[in-house]
Image (cartoon, rainbow, N blue to C red):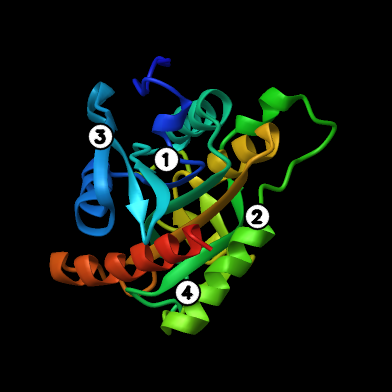
């Protein structure tokens, strides 16, 4: 079978558990450095997807692209058409607080958003997108066992990367929102809508308070820790 954005031949080509970095080259890096016998199942639009095994367990990794619409398309097709049940987004985020530092790993318990995505559901109120508790507990198990610490809380998924108002983030920070990225809310809403499990793990790469940014070398080490956390949780 094939969908508009994924050209896997059949359902079994994609594992029930999948990691979703935004960058397709990051998906390739994970496949080549962590998975045994990885096979590329998708090259449409350059959004690479691979399936292999991690410690004997089938795991897939699929680039999602940037932003909620792109994440929404790929997560929907993976769940609806290919039977994926567990989706773990791994990516980067910008911190809103001094005590959430560069290279810290943050798990998104929930994902606020400035998107009007949920208005298409015609709800008599506002839906609060949140992660799956079982996946969260698996990450906690791995964190304790591997000594890979993380922080957890509410993040915000934004539609706009370049804001005109330089202080926009302070209003989110005042409410205790930890960091900003661009995909988690769409992933959580699709998972809820389609009966799947989802979790978002991000590494702090930019800091709104200090103005700091990770170097390429720091990103490599920090992102590798996040990858290990996600992969180990994926096989529990």
Quarter where residue 60 is shown:
top left
Horizontal and vertical percent position of residue 9 = 37, 20
Q: Which residue is mark 3?
A: 40
Q: Earlier in the sequence, mark 3 or mark 2?
A: 3
| Cα distance between the residues tagged 1 and 3 | 31 Å
Residue 163 visible at all: no
Answer yes or no: do the residues labelled 1 and 2 have beta carbons within 8 Å? no
Q: Earlier in the sequence, mark 2 or mark 4?
A: 4
Q: Which residue is mark 4?
A: 97
For the N terminus, the quadrant is top left
Secondary-structure class at tag 4: loop
Q: Residues within 10 Å of mark 2 (few under 14, many from 20)?
A: many
In front: label 3 or label 4:
3
Answer yes or no: do the residues labelled 2 and 4 have beta carbons within 8 Å? no
| Cα distance between the residues tagged 1 and 4 | 20 Å
Residue sitting at 41 percent across and 48 percent down?
A: 59
Q: Which residue is mark 2?
A: 132
The one nearer the camera, 78 or 101, is 78
| Cα distance between the residues tagged 3 and 2 | 28 Å
Residue sitting at 45 percent across and 50 percent down?
A: 89
Residue sitting at 54 percent across and 41 percent down?
A: 187
Horizontal and vertical percent position of residue 182 = 44, 45
| Cα distance between the residues tagged 1 and 2 | 26 Å
Label drawn at residue 160: 1
Q: Earlier in the sequence, mark 1 or mark 2?
A: 2
Secondary-structure class at tag 2: loop
């Amino acid at each position: 079978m094939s969908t508009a954005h994924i050209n896997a031949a059949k359902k079994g080509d994609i594992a029930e558990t999948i990691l979703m970095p935004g960058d397709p080259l990051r998906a390739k890096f994970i496949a080549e450095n962590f998975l045994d016998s990885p096979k590329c199942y998708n090259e449409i639009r350059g959004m690479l997807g691979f399936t292999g095994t991690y410690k004997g367990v089938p795991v897939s990794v699929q680039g999602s692209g940037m932003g909620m619409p792109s994440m929404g398309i790929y997560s929907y097709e993976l769940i609806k058409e290919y039977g994926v049940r567990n989706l773990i987004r791994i990516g980067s985020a910008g911190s809103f607080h001094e005590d959430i530092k560069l290279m810290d790993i943050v798990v998104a318990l929930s994902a606020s958003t400035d998107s009007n995505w949920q208005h298409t559901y015609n709800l008599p109120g506002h839906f609060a997108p949140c992660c799956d508790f079982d996946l969260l507990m698996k990450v906690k198990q791995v964190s304790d066992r591997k000594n890979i610490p993380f922080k957890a809380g509410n993040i915000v998924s934004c539609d706009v990367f370049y804001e005109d108002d330089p202080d926009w983030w302070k209003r989110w920070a005042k409410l205790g929102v930890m960091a900003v990225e661009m995909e988690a809310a769409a992933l959580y809403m699709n998972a809820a809508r389609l009966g799947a499990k989802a979790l978002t793990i991000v590494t702090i790469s930019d800091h709104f308070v200090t103005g700091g940014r990770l170097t390429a070398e720091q990103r490599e080490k920090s992102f590798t820790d996040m990858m290990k956390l996600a992969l180990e949780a994926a096989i529990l």
